[in-house]
Image: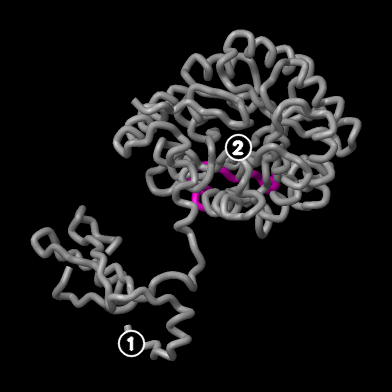
């Protein structure tokens, strides 16, 4: 069988699946149950100054029959006393020394606070630190979380403070609440971070209660912007991951991929686009810790099928295939092929094409909206034998209506 063990910054774990910093990793009870179920590692819920959470603090977006397509929270960092967290981290490490123990941190915005917090966490024997530069609510008002991650100069300064005292690997977690994650990514790499993780949650409003007229989650007649995660953010996470993996500076860093990982297929996609491992939260909150069995089994079977022996055999394999639009081959087309024997003449494809696309289907013929499986398939075809991109097309002065 394939070897799915992971080595991230020298931090070894039996598989590449870590639980992300969140409610599932906020106490010894949860973490021990996760390790017993088989998770490769955890990122302990963010430690910092004492906070007080509100209630309620969660909401979700459903799509059709699918529950929790997107998940929103306004929860802050750990609201448990620091000394209790540190004691429990040490106890978990003693019981499961073969699992990755990363501790998420968000100190007050000064050098002394960061230095003191790091030293206390390192005394537990933790394997690594993750700097939370992404929390989009609550902490930003204090000049922390996403307020740091949105400003490359501040992020650079904080990482420099951290690297002055850190003796274990440091992972910097980037916020997606920016136009591009690359500037901050570059700044923290220059400051000395050992790795990057992304994405944190996306600032959002998940909906409005049509009876109370207050957005969710509801707190005594008020609400605030929350952090959005879950399957709905996966496409955004993959895009931002790719931009980091393709950049000349940040692409050299180990990357922990986060954002909507629910299945082994999701995990493989993240790793193909440059992630060395993945972090999971919403899926564990929805299905429980036992999903790790499906994640590991699915990854193992896929690697066997493809002939990959280790994770490194395919990490980043898809990154070079993502190019600029101008470099795409104009002579390459995907064309719909309709199986008339399977067509039930519902007319959905004609409606979709006639009303909103390019009027390519006549009523006498049977696309993505088809309710019959494999009735319509997409066939590859070339309209000309040679590769021609948009720039070459313009240089040759070819007419735009040739195709």
Q: Residue at x 65, y 18 (%)?
A: 27
Task: Answer left or right for 168 relative to 61.
Answer: right
Q: Nearer the viewer, residue 135 or 286?
A: 135
Q: Residue at x 19, y 64 (%)?
A: 346
Please tell me in which quadrant of the rendered image residue 29 appears.
top right
Residue 197 visible in the current orientation: yes
Decide: is 291 above or below 373. above
Please give the label number shown on residue 66.
Answer: none
Is 187 contained in the magenta span? no
Q: Residue at x 60, y 39 (%)?
A: 254
Verify CB contact (< 8 Å) between mark 2 and mark 1. Answer: no
- Residue 139 rendering spot, x and y as whole percentages: 77, 40
- Residue 217 rendering spot, x and y as whole percentages: 63, 42
Q: Earlier in the sequence, mark 2 or mark 1?
A: 2
Q: Residue at x 51, y 28 (%)?
A: 6
Task: Answer left or right for 122 relative to 227.
Answer: right
- Residue 315 rendering spot, x and y as whole percentages: 48, 41
Please give the label number shown on residue 402.
Answer: 1
Q: Residues within 10 Å of mark 1 (few under 14, many from 20)?
A: few
Is 227 contained in the magenta span? yes
Q: Which residues are magenta?
A: 221-235
Marks 2 and 1 sit apart, C-alpha to C-alpha, by 53 Å
Decide: is 211 above or below 32. below
Please give the label number shown on residue 58.
Answer: 2
């Amino acid at each position: 069988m394939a070897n799915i063990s992971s080595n991230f910054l020298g931090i070894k774990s039996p598989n590449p699946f870590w639980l992300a910093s969140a409610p599932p990793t906020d106490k010894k009870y949860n973490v021990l149950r996760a390790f017993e179920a088989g998770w490769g590692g955890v990122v302990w819920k963010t430690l910092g100054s004492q906070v007080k959470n509100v209630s309620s603090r969660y909401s979700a977006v459903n799509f059709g029959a699918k529950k929790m397509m997107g998940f929103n929270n306004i929860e802050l960092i750990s609201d448990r006393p620091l000394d209790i967290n540190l004691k429990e981290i040490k106890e978990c490490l003693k019981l499961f020394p073969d699992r990755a123990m990363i501790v998420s941190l968000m100190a007050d915005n000064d050098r002394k606070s960061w230095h003191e917090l790091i030293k206390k966490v390192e005394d537990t024997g933790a394997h690594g630190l993750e700097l939370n530069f992404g929390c989009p609510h609550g902490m930003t008002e204090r000049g922390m979380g996403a307020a740091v991650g949105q400003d490359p100069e501040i992020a650079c300064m904080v990482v420099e403070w951290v690297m002055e005292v850190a003796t274990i690997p440091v992972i910097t977690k980037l916020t997606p609440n920016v136009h591009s994650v690359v500037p901050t990514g570059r700044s923290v790499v220059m400051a000395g971070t050992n790795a990057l993780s992304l994405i944190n949650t996306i600032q959002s409003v998940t909906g409005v209660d049509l009876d109370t007229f207050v957005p969710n989650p509801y707190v005594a007649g008020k609400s605030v912007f929350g952090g959005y995660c879950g399957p709905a953010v996966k496409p955004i996470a993959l895009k931002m991951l790719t931009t980091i993996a393709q950049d000349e500076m940040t692409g050299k860093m180990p990357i922990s991929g986060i954002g909507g990982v629910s299945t082994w297929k999701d995990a493989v996609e993240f790793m193909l686009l440059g992630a060395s491992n993945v972090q999971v939260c919403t899926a564990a909150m929805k299905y429980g810790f036992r999903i790790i069995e499906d994640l590991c089994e699915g990854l193992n079977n896929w690697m066997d099928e493809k002939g990959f022996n280790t994770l490194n055999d395919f990490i980043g394999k898809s990154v070079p295939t993502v190019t600029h639009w101008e470099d795409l081959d104009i002579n390459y087309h995907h064309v719909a092929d309709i199986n008339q024997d399977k067509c039930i003449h519902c007319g959905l494809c004609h409606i979709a094409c006639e009303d909103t696309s390019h009027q390519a289907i006549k009523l006498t013929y049977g696309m993505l909206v088809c309710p019959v499986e494999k009735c319509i398939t997409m066939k590859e075809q070339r309209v000309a034998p040679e590769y021609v991109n948009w720039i070459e097309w313009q240089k040759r002065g070819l007419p735009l209506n040739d195709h």
